[in-house]
Image (spheres, helix red, strand yellow):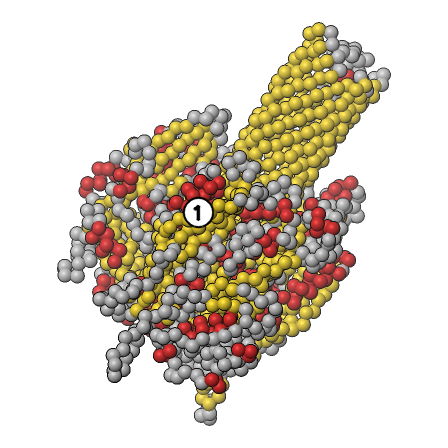
């Protein structure tokens, strides 16, 4: 109740808001919360400013603070329900008024959702039909509106959302606006604690609801920007030609036929994509329980036909339910601000507004406005659209729909942290014609702020995230095109037709297999901010700057393309930080100092302030950078590019920038991409997260520009320098969080396309025997299919922070160095001679900007600070280690990067450190230096001391890749992988005329020679290990048009002939594609205690590095090196991880830690964050739950049966599976398939075109194997290994159970555990439009050996060259839906360490034949499992009546998979249900295969090595079955579309459905938290994120032509058959903005495990692509193993009461009167 009581003064605060808005105040109404004030203010105390004497006391300080308006401009809202008046007997004092609370005004009036969850909609299903009736059609656009309304109803509050909807003809368009508002009869209840049962006077509800008080609520907001650049090339070899066959029919008329053909049997491609992502993540977490509120609402639909202005509306009654945190309720009658009329005068302090924007505790709550969201409504859409060309937002333009989504109030709320800091740069918005493009940069500034009320101790988790990812893809394929048809000739000259023409149908097909390997390094920094929060209501101005093509009126009246719009915003700040920023606090709130130095007693007994120090200065992964203002740097850099003529043309003109001269489309696109890359690199988010690299070698970004003959690269280097740090004080209830991790995706698949069309061609001999001309037109309709699938894994190590943070101030100077590198373009290099030797461009310095110092703040967990003595000792130890003479290094053997995985590192001094908890620092500069050195030696063909530094050239892509992938945060996040199997950077290219380079470098990074530095009491840490699978199916269609014009000439001599031909072509096309991706992941997380001991250890860094470089015509050349970097790393270890040598050091140096102000008692009445308790509170001894009672030294826990899946729990002591790769190579080398060793698993990375080795290692290494454990133990994890164009091989990693798991004793180290299951369905819709223009020239010559009269009269050859340039543009919309749950068990629940015997193997298959098998033999892992789970799982038994069904295997399931009767016979699961492990994915896959076979599907859907089979297997993975099973039981789920190639080709659509029967309660456990994704219902995933994407592709193609045969002078270029070989290269630049919200409910209740018999149904429909015939089949299967599901106890009791015939508790586990059930 304390959080509720803190809101008692909120009524007065709301009065102050109205006073500030109206310029007047009012006295409190009767029955208001005046009881919280001891007295009413006198006239002399009231008010400030022009309204003095009319306000409430204590609201405003003597001087006008930031943002308070100076004149009246706001009006109050009426109709707010007052508190019920209290009756009073005459002569008796009235009893205390009961405390009653209501919804906050923004939620009461349905203006914004705030921290709440909205679900249980009724009446929303009628909205779609009303819209359909108004627009005259019901298509996919209306389905999207329906899904958004059901999935994200809170985004329709206020003015609602607008959508463009096409009409029946497709030519007309409608703007549809849907909003949710209060219904006339809506009367939400008031809430009162201890409500008497007989109170019925007005709607009242219990404040402390039995369910709600144990249910917390989170709301996640995410906003991100992604910039990527892809470069690559392709090659093709084949032949093509056209031939006529004509015969004279009558003089002057020739009839016959014509044929055309083009075969390309050898096609290959390679691409490399670099991507940078920056994201701002905010999580609002309720501190107390929640209440449930049922509302009556009205759905309003407004439809306006664009063009004629006609508007129609409809209203639909309905209802919904809120879940709202108790601390966000306000005292009854509080009210709040409503509809406003704004003053346009700028008020307040700009510096103060900026400081508030940069505040770490700022949490956006809601964004509201009264303007309508549709065009012409005066909202943000109109503002942003006004600064761009009107065509990009015209009806039917893709840019219109995207801008509607980007300017919705829900999106603005999610983007607000970015808007207030760096702004949001929009993606390219495209007009309907595909040619006109515009974009914008949107920023927000706070104008005025008034305090509202307190929101209790609502927690805020803020994260800044930066991610860099590199993806390499390679593919090979073939293509064929052919056509034949009639032809006609007219005229006769020299026995041949003068004019010939033909028409024919043409068909074509193409297919390719490929792989894609992606690795992303992500880093986060942030904080969990607790403590009292103050809510503020403010006004912000959004400023839009436009760029792109200008409309006619813009060209006639050039001027600033800037527009502004104002919106209301609700946000909260921590009260003490708000006070420190100079903001007034809400009425009744008090706050202490934001930072305060603790005090202690010195040796003389005097009280002194504690001084703290950062052990490594401003560096360190756990030192967070705060209050960094990048605004001055951004403005300075933009000004430099606008004024320096050498930098002209690199950035677009935005807003007030002067309009440039007319530039080409490609140059404009490059400028916009440069701007986005620049803004992402120098964003506050990126610089803060990559602080360590900013303070060392700096952060680089490369901008590109091309002129006709040269390519220019401008590189900006951002470097920071810190001044001396000073301890500012500690901040209570502030947990600094940081983490870094690596995500790996290994994908493989197949793409194919088919086309059908027509060809018209005509040829004429203009001057017979001398000159010919021709024309050709083609029109094609095509269909494309693609499948791609594979495993994914991710690891994160998180520092959770402590109860307090230590703050340090320092002056930071930001410097920007601008350099330029220029070199001739490839065409110029190809036609001009070069200088002798290897050219290396020089980087020219353009400018050096010193931006001066600014005051910043550094935050770190208090436990990670040291005192002066420790600081001096750390410095002394580091200096001594670095100055010591270096010992001799142990050299190693390696034939390539692939050998690094087999390497056993040997340190020159000391022992290896194999385990650590957190990486504090690791110096990346020496790692980068060694990589560049080895690459330079390999590029010089490893000839002694010679070096070719081209790959190390400043400003070019290879060096940038090295600096990013070996940057500080990158190697810190990848250290586990680098120590386990190696860290690789590849595709480092430098093109030249004769000595082009293609290199790669890999390293094993080991920690050695550990030395103890410092002991800390915390903070807590988390270790995340995630694994899963994803599968994608894509279907597209398109049209293309091609024109070609040719002219040829012939010269004839006595014994020779010569000819020339010239052709010009232009091709244009457009296409649309839809893709569906499904993914399932399982994540395990283990926490260390918040106050558990952590040991800071300094280590040497041992580098074993190998570089490979291919030089044109030779190589790869391999260089290797080993280097020890003394004292280059510092890591934190738990006590269990300490090596013996360090233990002895610790024992000799430490005494029990004293409290020198390092810790502070937790404030009375406040709770710590979940999973973040102190060690004392987290010990198993504190456990009192009877379900998991006692702990003894000798465990009596039952065994974990060998046929039980490993579910909830933590995986420990996992064996090393990387040696399986070495063993598999050995088995292959000794067998009949020895040739496969170097073809499939080469030791040199540059020979591994499809990344087979690295993709396989991502499954075998420590992180990958732990994450993919569920599927490895349920049939295995499959990785496709490609071998050129042959059918791929399958490598299968399996972990088989070798016996029952036996407990080795209880776990007693106080760890919390989490088990997270998540299923994702992502739908993407893309639109492409492009064109290609080319020219081709041919020279031909022939001899006339028989003077032109014999059979060999024209024998000769032809050769030529062709060149083409292409451009295409794509825009896409991506929607992501998700369902999932996280179960959390704290350490008070007894857990056991169970030793699980396993056998690990790696098998290689070709088709169904196993070629080799590697086996590590019998080994074991440790599974930490809850004791109650272990006992419950020992009771799992398959019901006798289900044995027969399970033994029958798959059976016919009827005509359709979904029948209400079939599903209703099963159990209905709640949202809080989570599958506890799963066994049976191979059986489900076999069920899918049998359904496909029964529907007429071919063998390609089942055979190993086929892409269709692989995509199906990955879709139905163990992790997906675990995560999606609740959805399968409620509504079923579609699998991605899968396609099989072949002569006809087949399309497959399949869905999976499930039914749970014969439920049996297994046991009752202790209290757990069930964090459940807030879905409207279980039948559909929650929409969690929407992306707007745009990309442009620029390509260049060159090919050589050669032919030989009989050449007839009179018909030269009329008949041709010429071979060709060519290559293409190009770049693709892409940008995406994404945002989303996700509510999560968190009930904490006792957990119950229930077993069910699982029936699975699969419906498959197979359609032939050539003939439109379909076959459908339904197959059903009962799995032989029951599935175990975890649910909250109240839910299970409700199921027993309502579904007692389907769920039973025969063991009386939930009956407290019954005797305890047996455990075995």
Q: Can you say whether 866 is above or below 416 in the image?
A: below
Residue at figure coordinates x 52%, y 68% from the top left:
74
Report x, y in % for residue 509: 56, 29
Of residues 567 and 1067, which is closer to you in this image?
Answer: 567
Q: Residue furthest top?
A: 250
On the question of residue 253 being in view, the answer is: yes
Judge from the rendering whether residue 740 lies leftward or rightward of residue 1064; answer left or right: left
Instruction: Tell me if 820 is positioned left or right of 1222 in this view.
Output: right
Q: Pick whichever, 1452 or 262, lies toward us.
A: 1452
Q: Residue 534's x, y, as percent? A: 45, 72
The residue tagged 1 is 314
Q: Is residue 65 left or right of residue 1391?
A: right
Q: Quick one: 1020 or 363, which is closer to the camera?
A: 363
Residue 1678, quarter of the rendered image: top left
Q: Picture coordinates of residue 1652 (x, y %)?
A: 25, 47
Q: Residue at x 35, y 42 (%)?
A: 1532
Residue at the far right: name it: 1054
- Give 1607 or 363, whichever is nearer the viewer: 363
In which quarter of the view is residue 964 placed? bottom right
Secondary structure category for the residue under label 1: strand
Considering only vertical position in the picture, is 718 above or below 1669?
A: below
């Amino acid at each position: 109740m304390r959080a509720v009581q803190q809101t008692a003064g909120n009524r007065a605060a709301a009065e102050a808001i109205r006073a500030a808005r109206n310029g007047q105040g009012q006295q409190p109404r009767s029955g208001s919360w005046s009881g919280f004030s001891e007295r009413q203010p006198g006239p002399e105390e009231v008010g400030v400013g022009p309204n003095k004497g009319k306000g409430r006391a204590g609201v405003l300080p003597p001087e006008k603070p930031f943002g308070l308006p100076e004149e009246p401009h706001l009006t109050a809202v009426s109709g707010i329900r007052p508190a019920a008046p209290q009756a009073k007997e005459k002569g008796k004092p009235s009893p205390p008024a009961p405390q009653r609370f209501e919804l906050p005004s923004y939620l009461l009036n349905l203006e914004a959702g705030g921290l709440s969850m909205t679900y249980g909609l009724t009446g929303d299903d009628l909205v779609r039909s009303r819209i359909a009736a108004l627009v005259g059609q019901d298509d996919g656009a209306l389905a999207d509106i329906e899904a958004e309304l059901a999935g994200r109803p809170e985004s329709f509050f206020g003015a609602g959302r607008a959508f463009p909807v096409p009409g029946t003809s497709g030519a007309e368009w409608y703007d549809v606006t849907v909003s949710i508002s209060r219904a006339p009869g809506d009367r939400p209840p008031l809430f009162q604690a201890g409500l008497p049962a007989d109170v019925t006077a007005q709607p009242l509800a219990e404040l402390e609801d039995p369910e709600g008080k144990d249910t917390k609520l989170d709301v996640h907001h995410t906003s991100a920007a992604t910039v990527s650049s892809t470069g690559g090339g392709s090659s093709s070899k084949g032949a093509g030609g056209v031939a006529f066959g004509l015969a004279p029919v009558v003089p002057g008329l020739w009839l016959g036929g014509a044929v055309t053909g083009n075969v390309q049997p050898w096609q290959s491609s390679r691409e490399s994509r670099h991507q940078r992502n920056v994201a701002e993540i905010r999580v609002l977490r309720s501190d107390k329980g929640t209440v449930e509120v049922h509302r009556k609402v009205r759905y309003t639909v407004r439809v306006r036909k664009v063009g004629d202005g006609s508007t129609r509306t409809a209203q639909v009654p309905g209802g919904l339910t809120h879940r709202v945190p108790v601390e966000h309720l306000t005292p009854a009658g509080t009210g709040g601000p409503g509809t406003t009329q704004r003053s346009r005068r700028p008020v307040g302090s700009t510096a103060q507004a900026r400081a508030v924007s940069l505040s770490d505790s700022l949490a956006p709550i809601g964004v509201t406005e009264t303007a309508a969201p549709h065009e012409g409504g005066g909202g943000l859409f109109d503002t942003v659209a006004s600064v761009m060309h009107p065509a990009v937002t015209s009806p039917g333009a893709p840019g219109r729909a995207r801008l509607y989504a980007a300017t919705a109030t829900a999106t603005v709320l999610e983007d607000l942290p970015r808007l207030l800091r760096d702004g949001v740069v929009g993606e390219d918005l495209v007009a309907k014609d595909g040619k006109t493009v515009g974009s914008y940069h949107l920023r927000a500034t706070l104008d005025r702020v008034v305090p509202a009320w307190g929101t209790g101790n609502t927690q805020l988790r803020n994260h800044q995230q930066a991610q860099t990812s590199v993806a390499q893809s390679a593919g090979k394929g073939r293509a064929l095109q052919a056509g034949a048809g009639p032809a006609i000739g007219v005229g006769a000259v020299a026995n041949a037709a003068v004019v010939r023409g033909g028409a024919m149908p043409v068909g074509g097909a193409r297919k390719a297999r490929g792989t894609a390997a992606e690795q992303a390094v992500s880093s986060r920094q942030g904080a969990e901010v607790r403590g009292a929060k103050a809510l503020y209501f403010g006004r912000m101005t959004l400023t839009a700057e436009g760029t792109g093509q200008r409309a006619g009126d813009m060209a006639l009246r050039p001027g600033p393309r800037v527009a502004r719009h104002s919106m209301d915003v609700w946000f909260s700040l921590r009260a003490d930080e708000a006070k420190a920023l100079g903001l007034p606090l809400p009425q009744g709130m008090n706050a202490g100092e934001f930072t305060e130095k603790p005090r202690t007693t010195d040796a003389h007994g005097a009280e002194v302030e504690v001084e703290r120090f950062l052990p490594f200065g401003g560096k360190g992964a756990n030192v967070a950078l705060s209050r960094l203002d990048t605004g001055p740097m951004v403005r300075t850099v933009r000004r430099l590019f606008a004024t320096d003529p050498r930098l002209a043309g690199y950035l677009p003109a935005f807003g007030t920038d002067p309009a440039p001269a007319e530039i080409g489309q490609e140059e404009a696109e490059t400028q916009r991409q440069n701007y986005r890359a620049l803004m992402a690199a120098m964003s506050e988010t990126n610089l803060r997260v990559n602080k360590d690299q900013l303070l060392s070698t700096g952060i680089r970004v490369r901008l590109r520009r091309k002129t006709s003959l040269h390519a220019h690269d401008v590189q900006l280097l951002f470097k920071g320098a810190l001044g001396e740090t000073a301890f500012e004080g500690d901040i209570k209830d502030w947990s600094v969080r940081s983490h870094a991790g690596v995500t790996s995706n290994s994908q493989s698949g197949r793409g194919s396309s088919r086309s059908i069309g027509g060809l018209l061609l005509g040829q004429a001999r203009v001057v017979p025997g001398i000159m010919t001309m021709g024309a050709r037109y083609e029109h094609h309709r095509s269909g494309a299919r693609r499948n791609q699938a594979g495993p994914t894994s991710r690891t994160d190590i998180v520092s959770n922070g402590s109860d307090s943070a230590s703050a340090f101030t320092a002056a930071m100077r930001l410097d920007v160095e601008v350099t330029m590198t220029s070199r001739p373009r490839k065409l110029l290099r190809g036609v001009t001679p070069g200088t002798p030797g290897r050219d290396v461009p020089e980087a020219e310095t353009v400018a050096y900007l010193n931006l001066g110092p600014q005051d910043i703040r550094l935050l770190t967990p208090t436990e990670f600070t040291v005192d002066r003595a420790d600081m001096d000792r750390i410095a002394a130890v580091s200096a001594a280690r670095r100055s010591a003479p270096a010992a001799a290094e142990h050299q190693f053997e390696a034939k390539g990067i692939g050998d690094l995985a087999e390497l056993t590192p040997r340190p020159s001094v000391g022992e290896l450190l194999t385990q650590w908890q957190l990486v504090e620092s690791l110096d990346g500069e020496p790692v980068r230096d060694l990589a560049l050195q080895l690459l330079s030696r390999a590029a010089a063909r490893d000839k002694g001391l010679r070096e070719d530094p081209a790959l190390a050239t400043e400003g070019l892509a290879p060096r940038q890749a090295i600096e990013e992938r070996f940057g500080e945060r990158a190697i810190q996040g990848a250290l586990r992988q680098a120590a386990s199997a190696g860290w690789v950077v590849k595709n480092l290219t430098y093109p030249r005329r004769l000595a082009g380079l293609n290199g790669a470098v890999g390293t094993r990074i080991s920690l050695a020679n550990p030395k103890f530095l410092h002991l800390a009491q915390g903070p807590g840490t988390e270790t995340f290990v995630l694994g899963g699978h994803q599968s994608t199916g894509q279907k597209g269609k398109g049209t293309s048009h091609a024109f070609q014009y040719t002219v040829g000439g012939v010269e004839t001599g006595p014994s020779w002939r010569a000819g020339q031909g010239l052709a010009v072509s232009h091709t244009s096309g457009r296409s649309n594609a839809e893709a569906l991706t499904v993914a399932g992941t399982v994540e395990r997380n283990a926490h260390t205690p918040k106050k558990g001991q952590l040991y800071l250890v300094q280590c040497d860094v041992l580098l074993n590095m190998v570089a490979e470089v291919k030089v044109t015509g030779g190589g790869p050349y391999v260089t290797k090196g080993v280097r020890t970097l003394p004292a280059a790393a510092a890591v934190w270890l738990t006590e269990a991880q300490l090596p013996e040598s360090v233990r002895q050091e610790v024992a000799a140096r430490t005494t029990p830690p004293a409290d020198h102000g390092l810790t502070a008692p937790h404030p009375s009445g406040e709770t710590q964050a979940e999973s973040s308790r102190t060690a004392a509170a987290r010990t198993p001894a504190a456990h009192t739950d009877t379900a998991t009672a006692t702990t003894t030294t000798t465990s009596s826990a039952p065994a974990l049966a060998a046929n039980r899946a490993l579910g909830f729990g933590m995986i420990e002591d996992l064996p090393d599976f990387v040696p399986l790769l070495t063993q598999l190579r050995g088995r292959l080398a000794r067998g009949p398939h020895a040739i496969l060793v170097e073809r499939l698993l080469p030791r040199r990375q540059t020979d591994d075109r499809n990344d087979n080795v690295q993709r396989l290692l991502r499954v075998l290494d420590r992180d990958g194997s732990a994450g993919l454990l569920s599927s490895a133990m349920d049939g295995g994890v499959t990785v496709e290994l490609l071998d050129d164009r042959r059918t791929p091989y399958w490598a299968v990693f399996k972990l088989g159970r070798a016996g029952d798991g036996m407990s080795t004793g209880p776990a007693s180290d106080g760890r919390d555990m989490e088990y997270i299951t998540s299923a994702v369905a992502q739908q993407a819709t893309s639109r492409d439009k492009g064109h290609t223009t080319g020219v081709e020239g041919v020279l031909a010559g022939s001899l006339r050996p028989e003077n032109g009269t014999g059979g060999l009269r024209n024998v000769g050859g032809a050769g030529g060259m062709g060149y083409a340039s292409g451009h295409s543009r794509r825009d896409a919309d991506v929607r992501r839906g998700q369902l999932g749950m996280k179960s959390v068990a704290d350490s008070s629940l007894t857990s056991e360490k169970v030793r699980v015997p396993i056998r690990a193997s790696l098998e290689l298959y070709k088709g169904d034949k196993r070629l080799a098998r590697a086996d590590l033999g019998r080994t074991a892992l440790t599974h930490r499992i809850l004791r109650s789970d272990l006992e419950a799982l020992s009771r799992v038994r398959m019901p006798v009546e289900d044995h027969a069904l399970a033994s029958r295997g798959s059976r016919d399931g009827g005509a359709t998979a979904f029948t209400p009767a079939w599903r209703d016979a099963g159990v209905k699961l709640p949202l809080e249900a989570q599958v506890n492990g799963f066994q049976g994915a191979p059986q489900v896959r076999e069920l899918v295969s049998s359904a496909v076979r029964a529907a007429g599907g071919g063998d390609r859907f089942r055979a190993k090595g086929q892409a269709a089979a692989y995509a199906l297997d990955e879709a139905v993975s163990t992790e997906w079955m675990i995560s999606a099973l609740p959805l399968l039981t409620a509504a079923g789920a579609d699998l991605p579309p899968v396609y099989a190639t072949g002569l006809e080709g087949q399309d497959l659509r399949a869905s999976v459905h499930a039914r749970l029967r014969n439920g049996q309660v297994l046991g009752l456990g202790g209290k757990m938290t069930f964090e459940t994704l807030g879905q409207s219902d279980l039948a559909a995933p929650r929409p969690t994120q929407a992306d707007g994407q745009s990309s442009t592709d620029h390509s260049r193609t060159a090919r050589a032509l050669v032919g030989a045969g009989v050449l007839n002078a009179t018909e030269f270029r009329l008949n041709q058959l010429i071979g060709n070989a060519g290559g293409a290269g190009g770049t693709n630049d892409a940008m995406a903005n994404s945002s989303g919200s996700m509510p999560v409910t968190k009930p904490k209740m006792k957990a119950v495990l229930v077993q069910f018999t699982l029936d699975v149904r699969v419906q498959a429909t197979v359609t032939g692509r050539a003939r439109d015939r379909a076959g459908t089949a339904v197959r059903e299967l009962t799995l032989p193993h029951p599935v175990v599901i975890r649910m909250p106890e109240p839910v299970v009791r409700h199921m027993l009461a309502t579904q007692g015939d389907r769920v039973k508790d025969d063991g009386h586990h939930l009956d407290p009167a019954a005797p305890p059930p047996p455990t075995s």
